[in-house]
Image: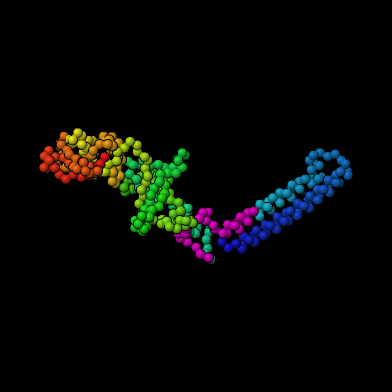
Amino acid sequence: IDPADYRNSLQQRKSELQQADADLKIEMGRQQIAEKEYRLHNKSLSAENKALVLRQPQLDAAKARVESARTAVEQARLELDRTTVVAPFDAHILSRNVNVGSQVSSGDELGRLVGLNTYWVEATVPLSKLHRLSFPDAETPTGAEVEIRNRTSWPDGATRTGHLYKMIGELEGQTRMARVLVSVDDPLAYRTGSSDMPALMIGSFVETRMKAREIPDIVRLPRDYVHDNDTVWVMEDGKLAIREVAIDFRDAEHAYISSGLAGDERVVTTNLATVVEGASLRVQGEDSQSNQNIAGSENPEDRPDAGEAGS
């Protein structure tokens, strides 16, 4: 903003302050003279009359004018400082709506800025998995770690690391999933030592991989080995047992079983054509293969090829 008028106003207020200081000094001199004259006459006066004789009201008024003039100087200096618009944080300019010579008034939008310190990534999470995530609180100021990837524009393997910031108290309109915010520090990688990191662009679509809370006492099994109605085929004493399991969590590749299956049990990984409870099983090449394969058949001649066993 053109500072000429405000600079002149500041100079005028400084002059008024100097005049008020001078008037105060003159009044203090007059008070000293009045005090000497009062002592020479050696008269006893009431406190109110004595203050009038010693010019105490005039002195108080002079001091008040000095304080008023000093306040006016500070106000004029503040108005002059406001002629320069400064962002309160390190920012990137998204748009600029004014140029030199533009006429603006109070409330006009000069431009759009975005802070460079932190960006927020908005992600969606199924409601059933929301309780697995850790958000900041009084005991843990930092939320769970989140890996961010942009497969369309970043180099292969390039990722950024963020942390869960907070949950938005509203579901996403179409998918009806919970919305969460992930904070990412130095999103544009402008700090020293960050030049090799990919930059986050506002409006881009990214993938997020969130680190959930640890699940204790769990068996992780590939999802292909979990069959209809959450059942798992296991080998018990050489026989096929169809075991119902409780699945606590699923991701893209694995099912996390909380009950119904122990970690040292043998799981049938072959896709059997006929599934009958109690059918005989064998481990193919048990003596020579470290990866044990289990197939089911009553007749050894008709046994199918076996898949890889796991537990």
Residue 304 image position (x, y, % from top left): 15, 44
Quarter occupied by the C terminus: top left
Residue at position x 72%, y 56% in the image: 18
Extreme residue in the bottom direction: 101
Choose top left, top right, bottom left or bottom right for residue 205: bottom left
User: Viewer-proximal residue, 284 or 186?
Assistant: 284
User: Viewer-proximal residue, 184 or 30?
Assistant: 184
User: Viewer-proximal residue, 262 or 121?
Assistant: 262
Residue 310 image position (x, y, % from top left): 25, 41
* Left or right of 272 on screen, residue 249: right
Q: Which residues are magenta?
A: 74-100
> In the rendered view, would you say 252 is above or below 192?
above
Q: Could one spot residue 30 in this view of the protein? A: yes
Residue at position x 32%, y 41% in the image: 128
Residue at position x 38%, y 55% in the image: 158
* Left or right of 294 on screen, residue 197: right
Q: Could one spot residue 225 in this view of the protein? A: no
Extreme residue in the front direction: 288
* Left or right of 145 on screen, residue 219: left
Residue 30 image position (x, y, % from top left): 81, 50
